[in-house]
Amino acid sequence: MTLKSKRKAGKQDNPHIPRRKNKMLVVSAEIWPGGDQSRAYLVGEITAANKSDLSPVSSYSVSISQGPAPVIGIEGWERELTLENHHRAEGVWTLVAAILNAVDCAGSGAKEQELPDAKG
């Protein structure tokens, strides 16, 4: 299967979501009003840059942001973090899930890390 980008020239960028220069992976969330791609606008974005020279277990510098939507009571926010020890062989969605899991999207920052229970 071959995946092709659906990103079109002229798409409206959200001025509340900063564009990063140093990036390797970009995950964008868009709204398509009424399913109309020509009216699409950006509401959130993740950018990640590999800091480990593409080693099999890598660290990433990550930025994640959400634009405000005052009509429905959503405030804009931006977070910066470093994600460490990601096994690249697990693929892109495992990386994205780890980024989302590391950020408290509804709160004020990075989540508290929970330590596993010691057994025995």
Image: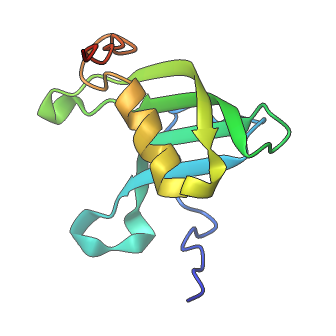
Identify which residue is drawn at 54% across, 55% down.
Answer: 90
Residue 49 rendering spot, x and y as whole percentages: 71, 37
Residue 99 rendering spot, x and y as whole percentages: 46, 35
Up the image or down, 13 lies above or below 78; here it is: below
Identify which residue is drawn at 64% across, 50% down.
Answer: 88
Up the image or down, 61 lies above or below 1; here it is: above
Identify which residue is drawn at 24% across, 23% down.
Answer: 106
Identify which residue is drawn at 30% across, 18% down.
Answer: 116
Compared across the picture, whether 108 is left or right of 92 comes to left
Residue 80 rendering spot, x and y as whole percentages: 55, 19
How many numbered marks appear?
A: 0
Up the image or down, 72 lies above or below 39; here it is: above
Quadrant in the picture for the C terminus: top left
Residue 114 rendering spot, x and y as whole percentages: 31, 14
Its colouring scheme is rainbow
Farthest-out residue, front: 120
Farthest-out residue, right: 53
| Residue 117 location, quadrant | top left
| Residue 47 location, quadrant | top right
